[in-house]
Image (cartoon, rainbow, N blue to C red):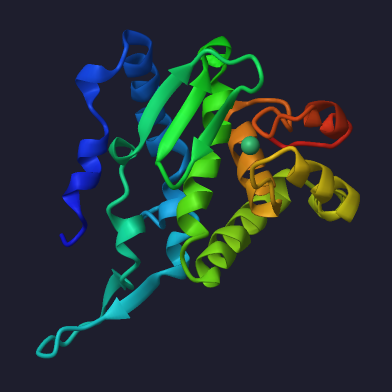
Amino acid sequence: MNMDTHWFMNWYWQEATEDEQTLFEKMIRFEQEYFGDMLFHYGSNTYELIHILSKDVNAQEWVDDSAPIPEVLEFFSPEMIRLKIENTDEMNGYYNHSEQVLCISSNSINDDSALLHEMIHMHEGIINELPMHYHDMVFWSLYKSLRTSLPELDDIITNHAHILNETELYESGGLHDILFLLKSFDIDIGMGYPLGTVFGYGKMDDFKEYTVNY
Ligand SMILES: [Zn+2]
């Protein structure tokens, strides 16, 4: 493993409060349950896009294998991220990619959708630093898996992508692009939430007319 292991040292467990430790354990569970596709894990929806057949020079048989992926994906662990709880009324949380800090407001520590929302930002932060095709691969896998659960998905995306909506979201801060929207739907469905819960920004009202096949 070539990755700078000092990354792990940014997170000092003993400095964390009890609430931060509890929330971090939840983050680990959510990470395993919902974010394998954003890391191209075996068995996730994106795995087919890195699946290859390989054969040793002297071997007869081709075997199932995976193409190498960037180390930031292969070796990612939530332990690289500093999870904090802050007293703030202004927002449910934020993710700062350059400092690798994921923060949840003390008012939102019991709101799992707030943590899941910031975890999407965390994973998109990693994906978006890679060549654009990694973003495409995650995007396509999510679209493909969601279109059966959400028959009106194309309409929802068209409305989301409209300049007035995208501009308003952009001005409110954070990257809430179509990939973010799709991943938030994927988790809404996994958690059994009404559509738009993880996305937030009052979108639950906008989406309540749409059919969801849970
Ligand atoms: Zn956000």
- Residue 27's place in the image compared with 71, above or below, is above
Residue drawn at the location 30% of the way across and 57% of the way down: 74
Q: Which image quadrant is residue 62 in?
A: bottom left
Is residue 20 found left or right of 58 in the rendered image? Answer: right
Out of 102 and 73, give the one closest to the viewer. Answer: 102
Whole-percent x, y for residue 136 in the image: 59, 66
For the question of whether residue 199 can be seen, the reply is yes
Tell me where residue 96 appears, x and y as whole percent.
49, 40
As displayed, is residue 198 above or below residue 41? above
Nearest the viewer among 206 and 210 is: 206
Instruction: Give the left or right position of residue 203, taking residue 100 as reference.
Output: right
- Counting from the top left corner in percent of width and height, residue 186 is at 61, 41
At a point 61% along the width and 45% down the height, the residue shown is 183
Answer left or right for 135 relative to 84.
right
Q: Ligand 1 is located in which of the four quadrants?
A: top right
Quadrant that contains the C terminus: top right
Q: Image quadrant for the N terminus?
A: bottom left
Q: Residue furthest left?
A: 58
Q: Nearer the viewer, residue 63 or 122?
A: 122
The number of numbered badges drawn on the structure is 0
Q: Is residue 43 above or below residue 84?
A: below
Viewer-side residue, 133 vs 52: 133
